[in-house]
Image: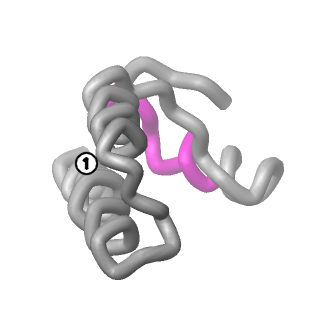
């Protein structure tokens, strides 16, 4: 399920995506740009810095968005 904004989703939509696909896919240019920057710096995602980057720029953004719905 590709969507422009999590704010446009209902709880039922999110539950359906997780139950059918096991994930919720959303395109986000800002996060995409952050990932490009990480790659240009040659940070491996498996490093402490890479995992911290993922936590701050992906997981925290998703959790923040879910709680703002």
Say which of 16 and 23 sits in front: 23
The outermost residue toward the bottom is 48
Residue span colored magenta: 7-15
Residue 3 position within the rendered picture, expressed as x and y whole percent measured from the top left: 51, 23
* Residue shown at 38% from the left, 58% from the top: 43
Residue 40 position within the rendered picture, expressed as x and y whole percent measured from the top left: 35, 37
Q: In this view, does 13 lie to the left or right of 60?
A: right
* Residue shown at 59% from the left, 38% from the top: 25
The outermost residue toward the right is 20
* Residue shown at 20% from the left, 56% from the top: 64
Q: Does the magenta stretch include residue 13?
A: yes
Say which of 21 and 16 sits in front: 21
The residue pinned by badge 1 equals 65
Residue 56 position within the rendered picture, expressed as x and y whole percent measured from the top left: 22, 63
Q: Is residue 11 magenta?
A: yes
Is 55 rendered above or below residue 19? below
Q: In this view, does 26 lie to the left or right of 63?
A: right
- Residue 64 showing in the rendered view: yes
The rendered magenta stretch, by its main secondary structure, is classed as helix
Identify the image's colour scheme: rainbow, by chain, secondary structure or one colour: one colour
Is 44 rendered above or below residue 35? below
Q: Which quadrant would residue 15 be assigned to in this image?
A: bottom right
Quarter that holds the N terminus: top right
- Residue 31 showing in the rendered view: no
Quarter that holds the C terminus: top left
Q: In this view, does 66 lie to the left or right of 2?
A: left
Graded by Cα atoms within 10 Å as few (under 14), some (14 to 19) or many (20 or more), the crowding at tag 1 reads few
Circle 1 sits in a helix, a strand or a loop, which is it? helix
* Residue shown at 39% from the left, 30% from the top: 32
Is 45 rendered above or below residue 40? below
């Amino acid at each position: 399920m590709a969507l422009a904004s999590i704010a446009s989703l209902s709880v039922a939509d999110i539950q359906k995506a997780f139950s059918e696909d096991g994930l919720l896919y959303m395109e986000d240019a800002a996060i995409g740009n952050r990932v490009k920057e990480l790659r240009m710096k040659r940070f491996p995602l498996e490093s402490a810095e890479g995992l911290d980057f993922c936590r701050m720029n992906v997981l925290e953004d998703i959790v923040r968005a879910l709680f703002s719905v």
